Image (cartoon, grey):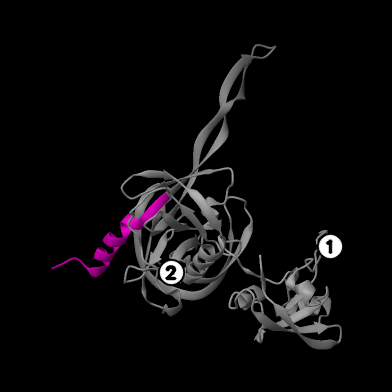
Amino acid sequence: MGKPEIVKIIKKVLPAVVSITISKYLTVFEKASNLSPVGVEEFSMIPKGKKKIKIGGGSGFIIDKSGIILTNRHVIDDPKADYLVILSNGEKYKAEILAKDPINDIAVIKIEAKNLLTIKLGDSSKLELGEIAVAIGNTLGTFNNTVSVGSISGLSRQISATNNINHKIERLRGLIQTDAAINPGNSGGPLINYEGKVIGINAAMVFGAENVGFALPINTAKKGLEELKKFGKIRHPFLGIRYIIIGEEMKKKYHLPSSNGVLIVTESSSKQEAIVPKSPAKKAGLKEGDIITEAGNKKISEENTLEDILQTFKIGEEISLKIIRGKKTISSKIKIGHR
């Protein structure tokens, strides 16, 4: 009896999965002892210079034989750290950061190597619950090429995750939920389907829960790769407003005329303007205090945010906005810019 098909697929894609080690120069200390005036030996720690120390690890996967690699932004987000890519055969290369997605947890890096084995990208828009999902990565930053097999257990999930580098809380949207084990160090590795194609980038796990992991849909990364190829950077739709999302609770608390949409406003402690100067919003005549309830004929809600809606349109495209200004409801046209 031959090997199961999934085993053959895993064997084929493993050479395209890489480990990423994160190192940084940190101050090291040594223990020093001396006698106190009363003859008691005391100890203190004194600095002994700086040493390059491994502080973490992640994963990635090769998408172009010239050395182009996809990973998570949070894996390579420390500007003071050095990143080393380790291939499945043990070869090591210094990573060059090509692009970091300012919205999604995606990054593109490159190594100086040629004729590398690659992994094909699938179509995450066609996923269905129950499909086979295989997560591969550098588990715990130590066990490279760790494979876990599960299934797609949820689609279009939203979570808030803490970035381990800057400890900021980031909201991740449209995620694939899987019961294939995703552990620290798996971040940036591929989530593949039964065809051996990447359907997601492993991004997060839920501490205290079993078999609950999340991956970024690969179609989001494909869109970023197109932007990088055309414009040399990953661009995102931009209106140029600072706002807060309105829900039922906020409507009651501040006596707002709508329970959905966004209220254009700047924080009282911030010196930044609610409408960014020279932005599409400024040109369209938007004002602080406006409530935008619809964009592109799509209703804005806590589940379908303004950011989510803008991602469905192209930069440079003109869309309609429905706005509540005072006691009036007005319509406006705005041309989507980019950040």
Q: Which residue is mark 2?
A: 178
Q: Nearer the viewer, residue 183 or 308?
A: 308
Q: Residue furthest front?
A: 230
Is residue 234 depicted above or below 36 in this figure?
Answer: below
Q: Which residue is mark 1?
A: 268
**Image quarter of residue 163:** bottom right
Secondary element at tag 2: strand
Is residue 152 depicted above or below 145 in this figure?
Answer: below
Q: Are dots 1 and 2 in contact, CB under 8 Å?
A: no
Q: Nearer the viewer, residue 327 or 239?
A: 239
Is residue 233 shown left or right of residue 145? right
The residue shown at (33%, 54%) is: 115
For marks 1 and 2, the one nearer the N-term is 2
Q: Nearer the viewer, residue 311 or 263?
A: 311
Query: Which quadrant does the C terminus fall into?
Result: bottom right
Residue 215 x/y as whole percent: 47, 66
The residue shown at (47%, 57%) is: 71
The residue shown at (47%, 75%) is: 154
Residue stretch in magenta: 1-19
The amino acid type, in three-letter code, at marker 1 is: Ser
